Image: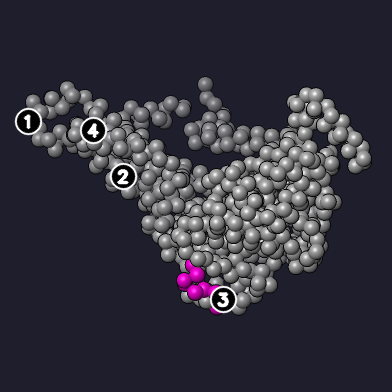
Amino acid sequence: MTMKRFTLSAAAIAFALASGAALAQAKDKVVLLLNWYTYSEHAPFYLGKERGYFDQEGIDLDIQEGRGSGVTVQAVAAGTATFGYADVPTMIKAASKGAPVTAVGVALQTSPMSVMGFADKNIRKPEDIKGKTVAVTPGDSMSQIWPLFLKKTNLKDTDFKTVAGDAQTKLNAVTNNQADLLLGYVMDQAIKLQDATQKQVYPIRFADYGVNMVSSGIIAQKDFLKQKPDVAKRFMRAATRSLEEAAKNPEAAVDAMLKAQPKSGVKDTALVGMKQTAALYKGPDNPNDRPFRVGAKNMDETMTLLVDYGGLDKATAGKASDYYTNDYLP
Amino acid sequence: MKRAWWQRLLLSAWMRPILLIVILLVLWDLAIRLFRIPPYLIPAPEAVVKQLYLEWPKLWRESLITTYATLGGFALSIAFGIPMALMIAYSRTVESFVYPLLVFSQSVPKIAIAPLFVVWFGFGIIPKVICAFMLGFFPIVVSTVMGFKSVEPDMIDLARSMKASRLATFLRISLPQALPSIFAGLKVSVTLAVVGAVVGEFVGSNSGIGYLLQIANGNFDLPLMFAALTVLSGIGVLLFVAVDVVERLMIPWHASQRNDFTATA
């Protein structure tokens, strides 16, 4: 099959030399819908696009910014976007309610969830949270796993004050001292806080206290995978290369992102974010695998957490293997 | 010709909207079955009704909180809107200074600045009330200004020629003539105030229907989300009806109120 592909693409290239338009015709148009507005976590895809990794696989990639993982999952399920970059636990919840989607690769296999505040407040251990105010977004994945973190660290929700608001309000609350801490991702909110205030942020990572759960990954519609398995394989090959290259060369990744989306961040802090993102590419149970290839144990643990804490209905949950596949990875 | 009791029931004024709702529910259900719309995109009406029943205590509790914020914002809208409208209507100077600015402020999308309300006023009921106020007060100002400006000048001249004091002219002539427009504004305002309160809750709050909507959204609980939206619309309708009742009591003489009952017979 690869031989056939090779001769096919060789023929295409020969033909393209004669007429330039033909090559573009032969490429598969693919829309990757991100989970949020672009930030450092997404830099690898811009790097892959700039370096032509997707072009070389015959894929014409269009990266679109998203408005939350939930919306991204719904768009992919409805066929509006070919692939989505979204929170895998969020996808599992949607899939358990009937959305025909599955994860074809898990990018962040160690949880980036953390509770963070400015470093000068000296909140570095879970005990330091006592008596402080924590900003959360009700209903999001972090607020659902938060009780487990509290349990693992022997904290009660009466030990601190909670304020609730949307994503922007959380940042505002900490910036303006209405809250001491917020629940956020180490490479997302921590960077945004630093960019806004020029102050150091100290995140207490959930993963360091025994709370691990996979995070962002690539999702696709099940029918699409059945009909065009070959496009999915080529896309994931290019995506894997992109992540590997971004981990090796974070600066190039951030440059590519800022070139494509100049408003998506500030170079220095985006570089920190990219490095922190790359540190999450490996899970606890598969240190030697290539990016996107997730371990079964890691996924099982994620499922258990989702059923126990994440609002996933045990009756309709099914098994972890219903929600992901490594079949399309190189 | 005398109609049967069930015909009269079906055609009575309060039955008509209910009938339309039932028809819409049936169409909704049919659309879902015919086009096989999956439940993660649009829930089936029966799932929504079931959630409405199961989660009723919670929905009731949260809707009270949203209602308080709405009423707070509505009261503020009246307290600020009507005096401001009076000043605009009676003074060209105030009008030329304030009115353009008012229109300008109204074009600012509230959702964009709502996160700042939380920064300025903290968490709790105040940012919600302010959001409700921001959305609610503009229609009151516009229609009150219109009401006072369209008072017939002949009537005022007549009152003056009869040596009525300014206060008496205002109370006997201007205000009664402006009331229908004012109430039109109040009705629009109260429904918008509900939206404002929920926007406030979305942005930063530990309670209320907006908070519930956020949680339902996070869990892909679309039936609960639609149930919350139904309750929310219910609040809007009830408050609208309440303003309508007050209107009937205050201006029973007005044309818009007179034929209401006979029209449907």
Secondary structure at numbered mark 4: helix
The subunit letter for the residue under badge 1 reads B
Residue type, numbered disc 4: Ser
Of circles 3 and 4, the one toward us is 3
Q: Looking at the rendering, which quadrant does residue A27 occupy?
A: top right
In this picture, residue A229 sits left or right of residue A44: right
Image point 41% across, 30% down: which residue? B261
The subunit letter for the residue under badge 4 reads B
Residue placed under numbered mark 2 in the picture: B78
How far separated are the C-alphas under marks 1 and 2? 31 Å
| Image position, residue A138 (x, y; %) | 56, 58
Q: Is residue A32 above or below residue B207?
A: above
**Is B155 inside the magenta-drawn segment?**
no
Image point 80% across, 27% down: which residue? A17
- Label located before the other in sequence (1 or 2): 2
Q: Looking at the rendering, which quadrant does residue B257 occupy?
A: top left
Residue type, numbered disc 1: Lys
Which quadrant would the N terminus of chain A be assigned to in this image? Answer: top right
Of circles 2 and 3, the one toward us is 3
How far separated are the C-alphas under marks 2 and 4? 22 Å
Residue placed under numbered mark 3 in the picture: A125
| Image position, residue A259 (x, y; %) | 59, 44
Residue type, numbered disc 3: Lys
Query: Of residues B20 and B48, which is closer to you in this image?
Result: B48
- Label located before the other in sequence (2 or 4): 2
Taking the view exactly as shown, the residue that stands out farthest to the front is A17
Residue placed under numbered mark 1 in the picture: B163
How far separated are the C-alphas under marks 3 and 1? 80 Å
Q: Residues within 10 Å of mark 1 (few under 14, many from 20)?
A: few
